[in-house]
Image: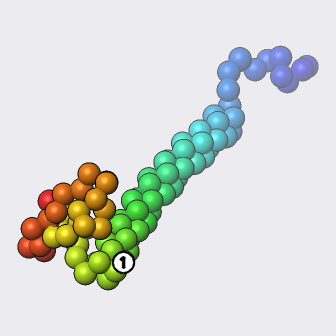
Amino acid sequence: MNFYRDKKAGFTLVEMSIVLVIIGLVVGGALVGRDLLHAARLNKVISEMNNYKVAVTMFQDKMSALPGDMTNATAFWPSAGTADGDGDGLIW
């Protein structure tokens, strides 16, 4: 008597559990990958913000004015199409 011929066609509980574990691992990996991409985007934005902060600080140290608020900007860059700021300490 062949034992395998007498069985009904279908999946066993062990086979189903293995498939479910594999599906869980794939979905979990995809979610972790998505979170890593989101964290990388946030780190990029933070890095760019820090670069802008450094650039504004360097400009202010060199020119003694904020960029966009410099009262004599046209004297420094006459052909750049710049406009003088009002020197009130606000950037618009």
* Residue neighbourhood size for the residue with mark 1, other residues' Cα within 10 Å, grouped as few (<14), some (14–19), many (≥20): few
Left or right: where 56 falls relative to 17: left
Q: Residue at x 71, y 17 (%)?
A: 9
Left or right, 35 with reference to 88 = right
Which quadrant of the rendered structure holds the N terminus? top right
Which of the 4 image quarters holds residue 64? bottom left
Left or right of 64? Residue 27 is: right
11 in relation to 30, above or below: above
Residue beneath label 1, please?
Answer: 58
Q: Nearer the viewer, residue 11 or 77?
A: 77
Q: Position of residue 48 (x, y in %)?
A: 40, 62
Name the residue at 90% across, 20% down: 2
Measuring 9% from the left and 68% from the top, which residue is drawn there?
A: 86
Image quarter hosting the C terminus: bottom left
Residue 34, horizontal then vertical, whole percent: 49, 48
Query: Type of residue at label 1?
Result: Met
Q: Residue furthest right?
A: 1
Q: Nearer the viewer, residue 88 or 44?
A: 88
Mark 1 residue element: helix
State whether residue 56 appears in this view: yes
